[in-house]
Image (spheres, rainbow, N blue to C red):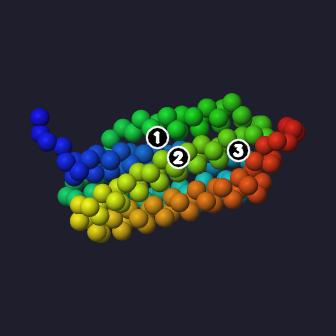
Amino acid sequence: MAEKTLENLFHDTLRDIYYAERKILKSLPKMARAAQHPKLKAAFEKHKEETEGQIERLEKVFEIIGKNPRGKTCDAIEGILAEGDEIAEEYKDNPALDAGLLAAAQAVEHYEITRYGTLKRWANVLGLKDAAQLLDETLQEESKTDDDLTVIADAAVNADAMKPKG
């Protein structure tokens, strides 16, 4: 069996987040449709556009390392997105729906933040400065999205979730 190096781990993790981003891109329109609060709906729509750019950046990172962009099934994102779908179904037409959708979205963001932070550090160790810069750009976007979701949660969504239906 061939020795596994940080380069292999970097490539495997890159494939993981590439798969995750593509799954997230497919989920965001569904989340936007399910959201009731206009600011949450808008946040999901904005993040869909950002995710398209993030996928393009990942494809550039694959190019930098001389590999074809190819995803690898990411069980973590599959599970997080399944939880979001479950919340959307169980809380449909209820005041707590948006709080649940927002929490699911933040779980996605936190997963992405850990992946991009790690990939950026590894890219620097591997001397892939251009890749590190691309990964950092996405890391900053993901952190900002998480912060924006927190503002929406604190400004309205969590309080609205406590109101009786109707």
Relative to 95, 126 lies left or right = left
Tell me which amino acid carries mark 3: Ala
Q: Nearer the viewer, residue 157 or 29?
A: 157
* Residue tagged 3: 99
Relative to 91, 85 lies left or right = left
Tell me which amino acid carries mark 1: Ile
Q: Earlier in the sequence, mark 2 or mark 3?
A: 3
Q: Earlier in the sequence, mark 1 or mark 2?
A: 1
Seen at 87% across and 38% down, the residue is 164
Look at the numbered discs 2 and 3 and tell me whether their residues touch, using CB distance below 8 Å. no
Q: From this viewpoint, is residue 2 visible?
A: yes
Quarter of the view holding residue 139: bottom left
* Badge 2 element: helix
Tell me which amino acid carries mark 2: Val
Q: Residue 125 at x, y = what percent?
A: 26, 61
Q: Residue 22 at x, y = what percent?
A: 43, 48
Crowd band around label 1 with a 10 angstrom C-alpha radius: few (<14), some (14–19), many (20+): many
Residue 52 in the image: above or below residue 18: below
Relative to 13, 81 lies left or right = right
* Residue tagged 2: 108
Q: Nearer the viewer, residue 43 or 107?
A: 107
Residue 77: mark: 1
Look at the numbered discs 3 and 1 and tell me whether their residues touch, using CB distance below 8 Å. no
